Amino acid sequence: MPLEHAIRIRLNHAPKRDAALAIISILINAAPYNRDYIKTRADIFFPQAIEAGDIKLMKILEEYCHVNNVDAEGYSPLLVAVENNRAAIVEHLCQRGDVGLNATLAGSGLSSLHLVRVLTVRLSIDAANGCSRTPAVCLFVLRLAATALRRL
């Protein structure tokens, strides 16, 4: 419970964010015997850290989670980052080399690449209508994906 509480403080309470990050690091490093607990919590909070744009917390949690897990709606962490316009996180995830660009969204038959293309179109429309999100993140992912596919 203390780990979950510290992560929630990090994600939700701006004035206490730095202190919470220090506590998270201490709790993870002090509990090497309880890796299963840490892994399950990391899998839960990893996408939330991405959605919030908290790259520091994401980097701590990524050591313990499955970076290709999908949520109940079928979104991988990469798609969560793209959906929330987190360019630095998208770049970081793609540079890892083990992030699945071809993972299929449950029930749709569409891969991450297809969904990124759909998001690119949607974000382009949003940008044309004055929305602050930009399709640059999606285009970045598509370029990386194309490079990765050429290597296959």
Image (cartoon, grey):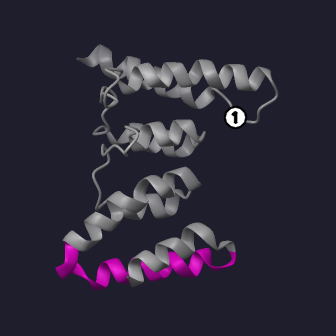
Write down the residue under mark 1: 133
Q: Is residue 40 visible?
A: yes
Q: Residue at x 53, y 27 (%)?
A: 140
Q: Main secondary structure of the magenta part?
A: helix
Query: What are the residue bounds of the magenta stretch?
Result: 15-35
Q: Residue at x 42, y 19 (%)?
A: 114
Q: Is residue 31 magenta?
A: yes
Quarter location, residue 62:
bottom left
Q: Residue at x 20, y 70 (%)?
A: 36
Q: Residue furthest right?
A: 130
In what element is the residue under mark 1?
Answer: loop
Residue type at mark 1 is Arg
Q: Nearer the viewer, residue 136 or 95?
A: 136
Could you tell me which quadrant the N terminus lies in?
bottom left
Q: Is residue 139 visible?
A: no
Q: Residue at x 55, y 37 (%)?
A: 83
Where residue 142 appears, as percent x and y from the top left, is 47, 21
